[in-house]
Amino acid sequence: MNQKKQIVIKATTFLMGMVFAVIAQAHIVLLHQTAEVGSNYKAVFKVGHGCGDSPITKIVISIPDGVQGAKPMVKPGWNILIKKDLLSKPYISHGKTITKDTTEIIWEGHLLPNDFYDEFVIVGKLPDQAGKIYWKVTQVCEKGSIEWSEVPKGHQQLQNLQFPAAELLLIKPDQIDHQHYH
């Protein structure tokens, strides 16, 4: 085998290894990872794999504290359950005092095979304070489950966590770079 062919084979093997490493590290993330404080936000959760080869049967999303009025988008073939709990601090929405709000949204009753990608969507009003919030997601499969619930502590980086929660950076309007903001 000539040297050029050996280099191509080594490069291809390396790239394929990198692709498989990225796939193995894939996790549930938000499509848009930055949003304006206090805005109405469409949270699109990208789901790229099951539990090993086992298909997903349920997605459970915990609504972060301070997110108000969270509602799921209907997905054909999936049943949706909305869990509401009493609030420690009620708020006013459209002239009404809200004392119970959504704390968890569950899609179940359908299969998402490992060979397919899907998105799960929630809308809600974001907190008024800048900073990071984390959406904890549980994916339940025919065999096993994965808790995407780790939150960085101290100087830890999200990318260094094994099972990171989906991160959303809330910024003030004067911090927005309109050329790069989606």
Image (tube, rainbow, N blue to C red):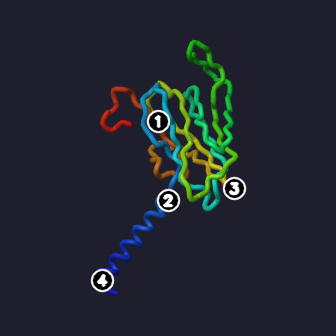
Badge nearest the viewer, 3 or 1: 3
Instruction: Specify whether 167 is left or right of 69.
Output: left
Vertical relation: 130 (above or below) 30: above
Amino acid beneath label 4: Gln
Q: CA distance from mark 2 to mark 4?
A: 30 Å
Measure the C-alpha gap from mark 4 to mark 3: 47 Å
Q: Which residue is mark 2?
A: 23
* Kind of residue indicated by mark 2: Ile
Residue drawn at 58 percent across, 36 percent down: 73
Give whichever of discs 2 and 4 has the lower sequence position: 4
**Which quarter of the rendering shows the N terminus?**
bottom left
The percent position of residue 108, horizontal first and vertical second, equals: 68, 44
Real-space Cα separation, disc 3 to disc 1, in angstroms? 32 Å
The residue under label 1 is 132
Amino acid type of the residue tagged 1 in the rendering = Lys
Mark 3 or mark 2, which is nearer the start of the sequence? 2
**In this rendering, which labeled residue sits more in front, label 4 or label 1?**
4
Q: Residue 167's x, y, as percent?
A: 49, 41
Q: Assess whether mark 4 and mark 2 are in contact (beta carbons under 8 angstroms).
A: no
Report the residue marked by disc 4: 3
Residue 70: image location, x then y, percent: 58, 30
* Residue at x-position 56% and y-position 59%: 115
Residue under pointer 3:
142
Q: Earlier in the sequence, mark 2 or mark 1?
A: 2
